[in-house]
Amino acid sequence: MIQNSIATFKCEVVQRKLQLVGQCGTGNFPQSFPEVAMNVQQDFENRRDEVRKAVNRDVIYSPYLANGLVATYFACLEVKECNDIPKGMMSLTIPLTTYAKISCSNKTIDKGYEKIFSWMKDNGYRQESLEKAFPIEVFYFEDNVEEEVVELLIPIVE
């Protein structure tokens, strides 16, 4: 598959409110990343069928938070309601948040982050405090492909 066919790097402002159910992992930052994130995603991929009332089982939401010492990375499904949570999972409600969004791919995430932060700066946006919001990586899973669409959502203020 040609990389540019799915990594459009289109930037825009969107608003999202999400109810999620999933798992998380925490590790020393930055030393244990991206390994912790990859492990959480792989574990959750094997358990996502346990989540009830999922909006779309092929879209994994991965909010994260980090400081200079540790980071916590989630792998979740959006749900219609947060009840009957499987053992070892948790619910997470993300209030309506304004995000800068870029579309990239699982092979171009680093480039996606570079481009979205540059676009934010050029357009007068700055990242919202991580005490108030989560950045989110959104993975659109497809069977039998090497490259999948990923959206990066960075919470912003003007």
Image (tube, rainbow, N blue to C red):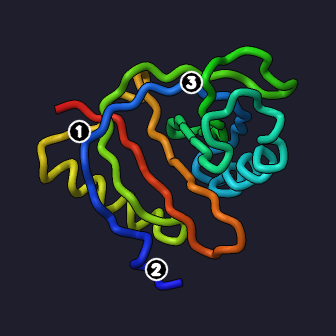
Mark 3 and mark 2 in contact (Cβ < 8 Å)? Answer: no
Residue sitting at the far top: 83
Which dot, 1 or 2, sits closer to the camera? 2
Q: Is residue 88 left or right of residue 56?
A: right
Residue 131 drawn at (x, y percent): 43, 22
Residue 92 drawn at (x, y percent): 60, 22
Specify the amino acid type for callout 2.
Gln
Q: Residue at x 77, y 41 (%)?
A: 48
Classify mark 1: helix, strand or loop: strand
Classify mark 3: helix, strand or loop: strand
Which dot, 3 or 1, sits closer to the camera? 3
> Which callout, 3 or 1, points at the residue further toward the start of the chain?
3
Residue 33 drawn at (x, y percent): 63, 54
Specify the amino acid type for callout 3.
Gln
Classify mark 2: helix, strand or loop: helix
Residue 137's place in the image compared with 113, above or below, is above
Along the line of sight, which residue is nearer the eye, 103 or 71? 103
> Which callout, 2 or 3, points at the residue further toward the start of the chain?
2
Residue 22's place in the image compared with 61, above or below, is above
Distance of label 2 from label 3 (alpha carbons):
31 Å
Specify the amino acid type for callout 1.
Arg
Distance of label 1 from label 2 (alpha carbons):
29 Å
Distance of label 3 from label 1 (alpha carbons):
25 Å
Residue under pointer 1: 126
Q: Residue at x 39, y 67 (%)?
A: 111
Dot 2, crowdedness within 10 Å: few (<14), some or many (≥20)? some
